Image: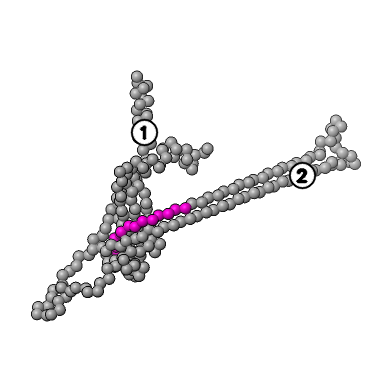
Amino acid sequence: MNSRLSVLVLLAALAGCAQTPSGVEPSAAYRPVPPAAEVPMQGSPGAIYREAGNIDLFMDLRARAVGDILTVQLVERTNAAKESSTNTAKGSSIDTGLPIVAGGPVTFRGNQFLNNELGSDSSFGGAADSSQSNRLDGTITVTVADKLANGNLLVRGEKWITLNQGEEFIQLQGIVRPVDIGPDNSIPSTKVGDARITYSGKGTLADSNRPGWLARFFNAPWFPF
């Protein structure tokens, strides 16, 4: 009875170890930055024009200040391919011939034993072929987190989508130039400098695409076999 209980406890422990991390939780680093509080202006009594009630008749609606939002069009495409092959061969041989000592060959019981022949051959052949392709389409609206000294904008944000079998999220952070922002207040991801884009998920579907702990053990780079 004790052995059966031990087996059940061991199986439960293995099942718990088989569960892999379900993903990344919402990060505080990607929370939107509120805009700076505006100081109300005091109007001059009796004046026709009042700065406190100023209205911009022609205002650019593109993001330009901390707290503004900006839409990033995700148009990421990456393709990589690599192929290599190596072939080497080496051969060597040595023959000392029949040495002559005192005008005759050296023998022992009628056999010449100083004649030596050595030979070796070695060869190596290797080939490798690798290719990878990635594609990411979509949109994400981020917030201007800081305005740099040269006028560029530091933007960051995340978007979570909850599905019936899990969650998917996109996180983006980078630097954009105000001149690259379009009239519709959007910019392609290819023009985001120092971009860091993360696309992943958590839940049942994401866990099913991850190998178990035993498979990860045998696929570890330090595994000798």
| Main SS of residues in magenta | strand
Q: Name the residue: 27% across, 55% down.
A: 31
In reply to whether residue 134 is colored magenta, the answer given is yes
Mark 1, residues whose alpha carbon is within 10 Å: few (<14), some, or many (≥20)? few
Residue that sits furthest to the right in the current view: 103
Q: Nearer the viewer, residue 129 or 122?
A: 129
Q: Amino acid at mark 2?
A: Ile
Mark 2, residues whose alpha carbon is within 10 Å: few (<14), some, or many (≥20)? few
**Looking at the rendering, in which quadrant would you find the N terminus?**
top left
Q: Nearer the viewer, residue 6 or 188?
A: 188
Left or right for 218, reference 187 = right
In reply to whether residue 90 is colored magenta, the answer given is no
Magenta-drawn segment:
133-148
Residue that sits furthest to the left in the current view: 46
Mark 2 vs mark 1: in front: 1
Location of residue 46 in the rendering, given as x and y in whole percent from the top left corner: 9, 80
Q: Is residue 21 visible?
A: no
- Which residue is identified by label 2? 94
Q: Name the residue: 79% across, 43% down.
A: 95
Residue that sits furthest to the top in the current view: 1
Location of residue 136 in the rendering, given as x and y in whole percent from the top left corner: 40, 55
Rounded to the nearest angstrom, the CA distance separating label 2 from label 1 is: 63 Å
